[in-house]
Amino acid sequence: MTKKTVGYVKMLWSCPRCATRNPGPQKFCNGCGAPQPADVPFEQAPEEKLLTDAAEIASAKAGPDVHCPYCNGRNSGKAKYCGACGGDLAGGKARDAGKVAGAFRSAPAAPITCSRCGTSNPASSLQCSNCGASLAPAAAPATAAPLATPARPARRLPVVLILILAGLCGLAALAVLLFASRKTEVVGVVDSVAWERSVSIEGLRAVDREAWRDEIPADADLGSCREAHRYTSQDPVANSTEVCGTPYTLDTGSGFGEVAQDCVYEVYDELCSYTAEEWAVIDTLVSNGAAGLPAWPSVSLGANERQGEQRESYSVVFETADGRYTYTPPSASEFSAFTIGSQWNLEVSGFGSITNLQLAP
Ligand SMILES: [Zn+2]
Ligand SMILES: [Zn+2]
Ligand SMILES: [Zn+2]
């Protein structure tokens, strides 16, 4: 996401000594003259207006103010010496900056009624126009929904249950291993053999597809195109539509707030239908037999046809004192060794599969 600055606004701070609400840029209280303490935060004004004054915007961009290490007085981030006591600000502490105060309050806020004399004052007033009392908004509008919903921690299974399950799984695996590793030796006679070989035939076929215009094969027949959302970029890119979230106010630490919004860039492109020739399986030729040498099916190709995948499979059935076992030789050359009636020493696993075999001497 790209953070875009919309503009700057003035924030407020409330004096902890006399409750007077002061404009953010002001470093000393209007009511009692005390400096703003370092731990008193800036608040959003009930109604925020983007600043137009160049000097104010420059101060808003200047960075956080610094508190004097000797008298705690608030000074501009650029000052070298404290305006209140003259102390060196080199060891001073900069105010926190970059915290989200809430959604940008661009809508007109309700007037504030003075609690002392009942006069109605505009939302932007800090003091009553009639009696001069400090004004606090009746009910500050609820701060904006958090910009990013924190992920809810996944519910965890109780540790004991996990341990029990793991233990059971381990026991089951051990039992399977023991059973599988149990091997028996038997003598088998080749009772029957079988082989099967197949060849697929592929033909060129016209197929309708859809793809981004720059990904369509050059020799395809282009159909109709339409604009479609291709991807969303976190950074600005050419030919994109900017989509921005709700503006919010960030405390800059200088008494001013930065109004910003997070934007993404949706890139649209031409999605087109096209017709292209593609190879597809149109037939599969199969040869098989229960004796003799395996052979591939004979292939004769027509126009716009080609030979596709070849498959082969072999099986040998042994008759033993324990019953019948089937073996699948991996290749034709191995298969050719199993003549009907020949005797073999077999090693059979717990699952009944032949794991090793040798022609009996
Ligand atoms: Zn005060
Ligand atoms: Zn000072
Ligand atoms: Zn009043």
Image: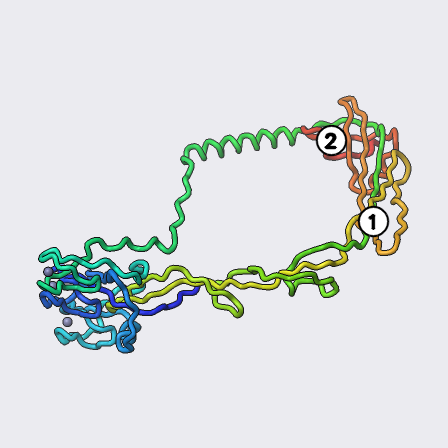
Q: Nearer the N terminus, badge 1 or badge 2? A: 1
Relative placement, left or right, of 254 versus 280 is left
- Badge 1 amino acid: Ile
Could you tell me which residue is drawn at 88 percent across and 36 percent down?
A: 289
Q: Position of residue 182 (x, y in %)?
A: 66, 29
Q: Quadrant of residue 327?
A: top right
Q: Quadrant of the N terminus?
A: bottom left
Residue 60 % position (x, y): 28, 72
Residue ID for mark 2? 347
Percent of width and height locating residue 133: 10, 61
Q: Which mark, residue 201?
A: 1
> Foreground: 119 or 133?
119
Residue sitting farthest toward the top: 321
Q: Which colour assignment does the render follow?
A: rainbow
Residue 247, by quadrant, is: bottom left
Which of 343/318 is in front? Answer: 318
Residue 68 visible within the image: no
Q: Is residue 20 left or right of residue 155?
A: left
